[in-house]
Amino acid sequence: MTDTPIQALETEVAHLTRTVDELNDVVAKQDTELRRLTRLVDMLVERETAREAEGGGGMILGDERPPHY
């Protein structure tokens, strides 16, 4: 049994619609994850900026031993 041209087009549109819906779900999940990671990076940048402002950089000069020795 063969599909008529109209049925074949309707079938193709249904498949394409499903594919677009699935891709939309993927993009929405990626957007959520990207926003979460962006907030995390912003938080880490703020934390590091505050740490540098406090002068707690902990730079080791010459043969100085790190504090954990």
Image: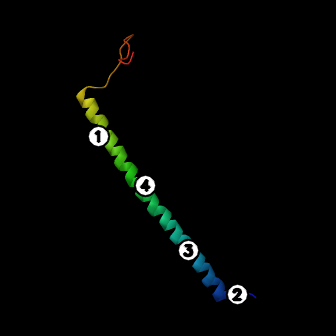
The residue identified by callout 4 is: 33
In the displayed structure image, the side of residue 8 where residue 23 appears, left or right = left
- Label 2 and label 4: CA atoms lie apart by 42 Å
Q: Nearer the viewer, residue 64 or 68?
A: 68
Amino acid found under the numbered disc labelled 1: Glu
**CB contact under 8 Å: marks 2 and 4:** no
Seen in the picture, residue 23 relative to 62 is either above or below; the reply is: below
Q: Which of disc 3 and disc 4 is earlier in sequence?
A: 3
- Label 1 and label 3: CA atoms lie apart by 42 Å
- Label 4 and label 3: CA atoms lie apart by 23 Å
Query: Mark 4 Cα within 10 Å, few/some/many (few <14, many 20+)?
Result: few
**CB contact under 8 Å: marks 1 and 3:** no
The residue identified by callout 1 is: 46
Which residue lies at the image location 37% right of the left edge and 17% below the top edge?
66
Q: Nearer the viewer, residue 19 or 5?
A: 19
Question: Could you say where residue 28 lies in the image, as x and y percent from the top left?
Answer: 44, 63
Q: Which mark is residue 18?
A: 3
Q: Which of disc 4 and disc 2 is earlier in sequence?
A: 2
Query: Mark 2 Cα within 10 Å, few/some/many (few <14, many 20+)?
Result: few
Q: Secondary structure at mark 1?
A: helix
- Label 1 and label 2: CA atoms lie apart by 62 Å
Seen in the picture, residue 59 relative to 13 is either above or below; the reply is: above
Amino acid found under the numbered disc labelled 3: Arg
Amino acid found under the numbered disc labelled 2: Asp
The residue identified by callout 2 is: 3
